[in-house]
């Protein structure tokens, strides 16, 4: 395999030095740009990794990305370094036999000069290269020891000559060389060797040889017998044997006495771990239990491990990997712990991770066990602890670890309500729970059905048998202090959460805190961009999902992934907020909602009378993202409606008044089109209070105008007039001509609906003049239509035709299809009064087509009502009756009592003319009742 370029070779070399382990990005950058990395170093690193992946594609190695860096994943037999360490480990397990010598020869034959000698040196490599070089020297000394034990003194002497050439000041090597030569009868060579090393030590270092070396020289001079060379020639770090048949380890923690529920998870996990499912020579069975903090991963794992432990008589290992500790456990230390449990003494522990891992696999190969790895930090930590074959491995982790091939992943969620209730009952007693079941259910809701929280709550109640459950219920009701209450002894929900959040990057932590402020609704992924104030924030969200701090809540109708915090996690996130950074992040998120809403609103069929803040939003999504998200504006509004309403609530609750009323005002065209009157009122009342508290008079006026419009739709004319008058006064005082004109139009509509047509006509003429003065052509079209509508009510057909025709012409010039539909509906009424039934039907049909195409059910119901009445008048009673009943159903659903009354009246007259007296009387009576209610509501 040929790799062009120095930097890709440096990168691959650094990864291979620690193969199958994560190498930090910072270390890789230091190797590539020692001391002076460019600003684009991280991006350049990704480019180099990508190019290497292309080169490695034909091999059986791959480069995997991790949150902190990269790891090259390669099998031992494919990499000389790993193969070397594996062969040395096998040799040590074989003691001093011919098999050991064979393994050591193969291992040493892999060496070709100085490691990485053809690349520029890097300080980052120093420690690892020293370790490798020392491992090579240790292997060479072990081979010499094996040869000496087998009586191959001549061959051992030649190997020692090579070693003293490489390490000329190692007196112990010279001593063994001299004695080996003496043993083979080469006394003169032994004496010459001593002379050479003595001269070298004196000339280079100014010292005489040490005592051991002098004693070897004296023994040669005296012709004494050679002492046993074997003990002296074995390094102290090299094992001379591996203990046989140590006592089996049975290390599983105690089972959970009150383990509750999880039947499906227990069945799946025990099936994966069952010894009967394992092939003795096959790969290990790996089951991974993941989930958020406190969800009961370890409890489930321990329970299932006990259920299958009978199938593993050779033992069960349990290692705590400390994945949520400030510093996760070192694989080298974990392997040492496992090897000690398997009977390997301290003196026999190999020095490197790879060697320990190889010995660990060798020992487990003949003794299949259940290996329980609790609280794993990442795949690299687990990989070093995987047996070679025939074992079952059970792993728990808060991180979603998916890089290990063949792993069965089991994701735990919070308990279902009934299982959470059962667990609480087991802790506090079923009778006590049944006596205050509603309080118990409220406690469980406050705990978010999280098993750890339920256990803590149960422990607190168990420790206070005199407490009514309602006491804890009341204490948990306040979200700001909820986590303070969920603590009992060494059980603590907050502490469990903090062990996960403290390992977050700064971006992920900022995103986590902001998500806590955004309420329980799911949010789209772009929110992270707004929180961080830059693009590509999805990496922060991905890291939160991988850490199981944020739940991936599926995708919406637009194909966007949605994210949501667990309930108690949201409490944790909110308690970490409050600074200026979080306030600015929140303002950007709200700005993102406002800009997206404005972009979607601009694509709706009608945007009349929008009143938004004059200053731009503090943050906006990129244009291409806005275009993609809002290409179907109605689908976007439906997907985000709950989040948008909660965003207004959040802005109002945090004092961001401009964001609150700006977003509420931007939502009006959608609320109007789909008759979302409840959401309209809620958002506007919240934003109105916020604007008043902030002294934002334009925001106050805009919200009053919006609320007045809702009152008009709901036939509450007196209330509408009060709000619209206050809005007009404020707009007038602010010099906002357009805002005042819009408010006057609302007052004109209230007058018209109350039967005061001349007053309404004056209002609309006044508003028209103001719209003309500010050049608002959309407002002009509306005012001309409204004036034509008044003349229709006054039976002045010539004036009505004039004003409506001008309104239709202007609507078409503006491309305002919705306004064209409204005018067409009034022109239909005009032609009906002129006794031109065909033209009346054509106009009303055109209006109905427009409204149905635009999805405006409210205006469509009025067009349907008019068309039904025309059909009845033409003798098409069946079709006309169907249309009238359909329009009635819409009016009733939307709460439009005026439209409902008119339709009841028309249907009543239809049934009376058809001789159905009783049914007609009911319908006409209901029309009278509704009109009476309308007069009372209008204050007339």
Image (spheres, grey):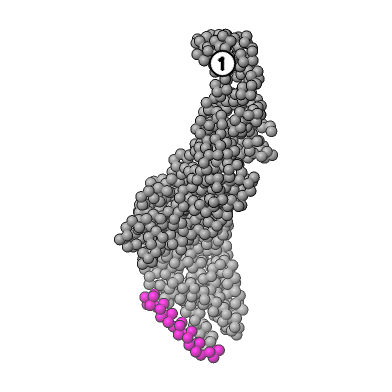
Up/down of 807 relative to 687, above or below: below
Q: State the residue position of label 1.
A: 175
Main SS class of the magenta portion in the image: helix
Q: Residue drawn 55% across and 80% down?
A: 869
Q: Quarter holding the C terminus?
A: bottom left
Residue 753: x and y, percent?
44, 74
Magenta residues, start to end: 913-940
Asked whether the viewer can see residue 281, the reply is yes
Q: Residue drawn 61% across and 79% down?
A: 838
Q: Residue drawn 51% across and 69% down?
A: 785
Judge whether residue 917 is colored magenta: yes
Q: Residue drawn 43% across and 70% down?
A: 712
Residue 283: x and y, percent?
62, 45
- Of residues 115 and 584, the one drawn nearer to the viewer in this rendering: 115
Up/down of 849 relative to 509, above or below: below
Q: Quarter holding the N terminus?
A: top right
Name the outermost residue toward the front.
225
Judge from the rendering whether residue 399 lies leftward or rightward of residue 104; answer left or right.
Answer: left
């Amino acid at each position: 395999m040929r790799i062009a370029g120095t930097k890709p070779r440096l990168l691959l070399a650094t990864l291979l030095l620690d193969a199958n382990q994560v190498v930090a990005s910072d270390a890789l950058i230091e190797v590539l740009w020692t001391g002076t990395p460019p600003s684009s170093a991280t991006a350049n690193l990704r480019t180099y990794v990508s190019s290497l992946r292309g080169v490695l594609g034909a091999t059986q190695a791959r480069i995997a990305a991790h949150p902190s860096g990269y790891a090259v994943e390669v099998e031992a037999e494919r990499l000389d370094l790993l193969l070397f360490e594996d062969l040395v480990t096998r040799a040590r397990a074989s003691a001093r036999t011919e098999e050991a010598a064979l393994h050591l020869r193969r291992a040493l034959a892999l060496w070709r000069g100085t490691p990485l000698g053809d690349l520029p040196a890097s300080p980052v490599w120093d420690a690892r290269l020293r370790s490798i070089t020392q491992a090579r020297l240790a292997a060479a000394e072990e081979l010499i020891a094996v040869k000496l034990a087998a009586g191959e003194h001549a061959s051992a002497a030649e190997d020692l000559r090579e070693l003293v050439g490489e390490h000329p000041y190692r007196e112990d090597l010279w001593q063994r060389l001299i004695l080996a030569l003496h043993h083979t009868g080469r006394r003169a060579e032994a004496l010459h060797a001593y002379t050479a090393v003595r001269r070298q030590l004196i000339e280079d270092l100014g010292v005489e040889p040490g005592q051991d070396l002098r004693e070897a020289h004296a023994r040669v001079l005296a012709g004494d017998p050679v002492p046993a060379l074997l003990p002296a020639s074995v390094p102290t770090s090299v094992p001379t044997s591996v203990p046989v048949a140590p006592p089996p380890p049975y290390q599983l923690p105690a089972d959970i006495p009150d383990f509750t529920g999880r039947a499906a998870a227990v069945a799946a996990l025990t099936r994966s771990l069952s010894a009967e499912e394992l092939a003795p020579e096959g790969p290990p069975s790996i089951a991974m239990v993941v989930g958020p903090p406190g969800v009961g991963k370890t409890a489930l794992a321990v329970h299932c491990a006990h259920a299958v432990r009978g199938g593993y008589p050779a033992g069960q290992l349990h290692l705590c990997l400390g994945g949520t500790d400030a510093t996760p456990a070192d694989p080298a230390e974990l392997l040492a712990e496992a090897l000690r449990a398997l009977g390997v003494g301290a003196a026999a522990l190999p020095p490197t991770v790879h060697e320990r891992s190889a010995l660990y696999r060798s020992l487990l190969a003949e003794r299949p066990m259940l290996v329980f790895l609790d609280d794993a930090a990442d795949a690299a930590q687990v990989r070093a602890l995987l047996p070679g074959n025939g074992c079952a491995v059970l792993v728990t982790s808060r991180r979603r670890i998916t890089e290990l091939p063949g792993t069965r992943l089991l994701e735990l969620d919070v308990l279902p309500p009934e299982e959470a209730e059962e667990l609480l009952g087991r802790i506090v007693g079923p009778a006590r729970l049944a006596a205050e079941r509603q309080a118990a259910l409220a406690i469980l809701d406050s705990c978010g059905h999280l098993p750890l929280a339920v256990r803590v709550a149960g422990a607190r109640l168990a420790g206070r048998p005199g407490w009514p459950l309602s006491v804890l219920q009341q204490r948990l009701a306040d979200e700001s202090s909820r986590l303070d209450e969920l603590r009992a002894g060494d059980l603590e929900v907050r502490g469990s959460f903090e062990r996960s959040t403290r390992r977050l990057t700064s971006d992920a932590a900022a995103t986590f805190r902001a998500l806590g402020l955004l309420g329980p609704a799911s949010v789209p992924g772009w929110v992270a961009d707004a929180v961080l104030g830059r693009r590509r924030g999805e990496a922060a969200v991905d890291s939160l999902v991988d850490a199981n701090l944020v739940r991936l809540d599926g995708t919406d109708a637009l194909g966007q992934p949605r994210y949501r915090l667990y309930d108690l996690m949201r409490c944790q996130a909110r308690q970490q907020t409050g600074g200026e950074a979080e306030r600015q992040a929140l303002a950007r998120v709200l700005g993102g909602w406002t800009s997206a809403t404005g972009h979607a609103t601009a694509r709706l069929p009608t945007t009349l009378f929008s009143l938004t803040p004059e200053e731009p939003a503090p943050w906006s999504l990129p244009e291409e993202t806005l275009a993609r998200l809002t290409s179907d504006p109605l689908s976007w509004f439906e997907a985000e409606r709950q989040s948008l309403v909660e965003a207004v609530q959040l802005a109002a609750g945090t004092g961001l008044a401009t964001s609150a009323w700006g977003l509420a005002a931007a939502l009006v065209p959608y609320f109007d089109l789909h008759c979302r009157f409840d959401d309209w009122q809620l958002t506007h009342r919240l934003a109105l209070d916020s604007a008043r508290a902030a002294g934002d008079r334009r925001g106050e006026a805009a919200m009053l105008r919006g609320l007045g419009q809702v009152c008009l739709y709901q036939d509450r004319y007196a209330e509408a007039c009060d709000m619209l008058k206050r809005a007009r006064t404020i707009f007038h005082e602010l010099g906002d001509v357009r805002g005042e004109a819009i408010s006057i139009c609302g007052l004109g509509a209230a007058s018209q609906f109350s039967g005061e047509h001349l007053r309404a006509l004056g209002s609309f003429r006044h508003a028209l003049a103001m719209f003309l003065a500010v050049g608002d052509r959309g407002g002009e079209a509306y005012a001309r239509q409204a004036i034509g509508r008044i003349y229709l009510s006054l039976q002045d057909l010539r004036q009505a035709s004039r004003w409506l025709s001008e309104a239709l012409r202007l609507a078409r010039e503006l491309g305002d299809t919705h306004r064209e539909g409204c005018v067409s509906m009034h022109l239909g009424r005009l032609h009906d009064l002129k006794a031109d039934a065909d033209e009346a039907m054509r106009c009303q049909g055109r209006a109905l087509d427009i409204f149905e195409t635009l999805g405006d059910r409210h205006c469509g119901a009025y067009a349907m009502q008019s068309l039904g009445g025309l059909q009845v008048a033409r003798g098409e009673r069946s079709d006309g009756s169907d249309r009238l009943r359909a329009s009635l159903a819409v009016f009733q659903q939307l709460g439009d009592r005026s439209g409902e009354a008119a339709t009841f009246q028309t249907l009543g007259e239809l049934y009376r003319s058809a001789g159905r007296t009783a049914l007609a009387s009911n319908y006409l009576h209901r029309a009278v009742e509704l009109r009476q209610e309308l007069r009372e509501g209008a204050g007339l």
